[in-house]
């Protein structure tokens, strides 16, 4: 890889930089596990290593796909060493006693890098209902696209100045979260009363049944 391409990669890796910043904002050390492919060049890996060094994060090459468990030894050793040698000063992003909207706004502005939040009429009504029921002091879990820090899957990298649209707010009381759905995200359906995993078994000869 040409040097100018390496520099372009470093400059363009804004998404990685943002994720490192987000994790460090919790007061914990960070290890970046790089899932190595055969097509990755030494120059590309070195570029990622430089980014991690710049942001005071550890880098580990994960090669478990090609080498199995052996390919994850370096990552495991670095995690153990970090746990033994460093003393994290963990801190929460927000106080759960804040209002639902304040908690959502904190996540959007501090973690996603957005400028604000807008709410559908349905979401506004649902928030008022949760507040009336005294269920507003739980932590917030936001469901949004996995392709962007925003709620728009076309906004890649590290978008800024965007507004996240909250379409639905509900409580998962058993899990202990207020679930916030954004944009047009579709959440996964819940498990049936008896999950398929209960039908899976393995006998003394190593034969597995119940997968299909």
Image: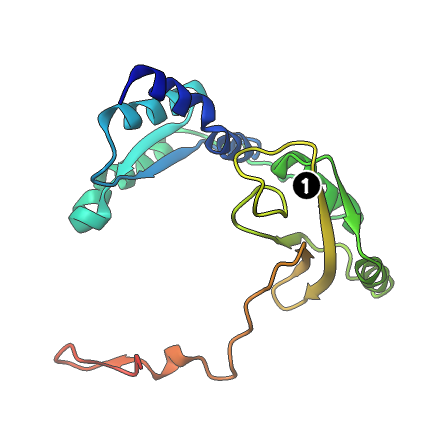
Whether 206 is drawn above or below 46: the answer is: below
Identify the image quadrant of the C terminus: bottom left
Colouring scheme, one of rainbow, by chain, secondary structure, one colour: rainbow
- Residue 38 shows up from this direction: yes
Left or right placement of residue 149 versus residue 108 in this view? left
Task: Please state which of residues 29 and 153 is positioned toward the viewer in this rendering.
Answer: 153
Report the residue marked by disc 1.
Answer: 108
Q: Is residue 5 left or right of residue 73?
A: right
Name the residue nearer the viewer: 193 or 38: 38
Residue that protrudes farthest toward the left in the picture:
205
Relative depth, front residue between 22 and 88: 22
Counting from the top left corner in percent of width and height, residue 92 is at: 62, 40
Q: Quadrant of residue 115?
A: top right
Q: Position of residue 112 (x, y in %)?
A: 62, 38
Residue drawn at (55%, 73%), measured in percent from left and top? 190
Q: Could you tell me which residue is drawn at 54 percent across and 39 percent down? A: 156
């Amino acid at each position: 890889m040409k040097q100018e391409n390496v520099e372009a990669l470093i400059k363009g890796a804004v998404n990685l930089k943002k994720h490192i910043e987000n994790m460090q904002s919790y007061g914990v050390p960070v290890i970046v596990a790089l899932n190595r492919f055969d097509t990755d060049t030494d120059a590309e890996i070195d570029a990622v290593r430089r980014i991690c060094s710049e942001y005071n994060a550890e880098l580990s090459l994960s090669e478990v796909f090609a080498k199995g468990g052996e390919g994850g030894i370096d990552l495991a050793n670095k995690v153990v060493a970090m746990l033994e040698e460093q003393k994290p000063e963990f801190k929460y992003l927000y106080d759960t006693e804040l209002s639902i909207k304040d908690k959502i706004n904190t996540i959007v502005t501090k973690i996603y890098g957005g400028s604000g939040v807008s709410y559908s009429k349905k979401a506004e009504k649902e928030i008022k209902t949760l507040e009336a029921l005294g269920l507003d002091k739980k932590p917030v879990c936001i469901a949004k696209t996995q392709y962007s820090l925003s709620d728009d899957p076309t906004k890649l990298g590290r978008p800024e100045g965007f507004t996240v649209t909250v379409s639905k707010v509900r409580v998962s009381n058993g899990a202990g979260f207020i679930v916030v759905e954004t944009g047009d995200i579709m959440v996964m359906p819940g498990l049936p009363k008896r999950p398929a995993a209960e039908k899976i078994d393995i006998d003394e000869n190593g034969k597995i049944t119940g997968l299909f």
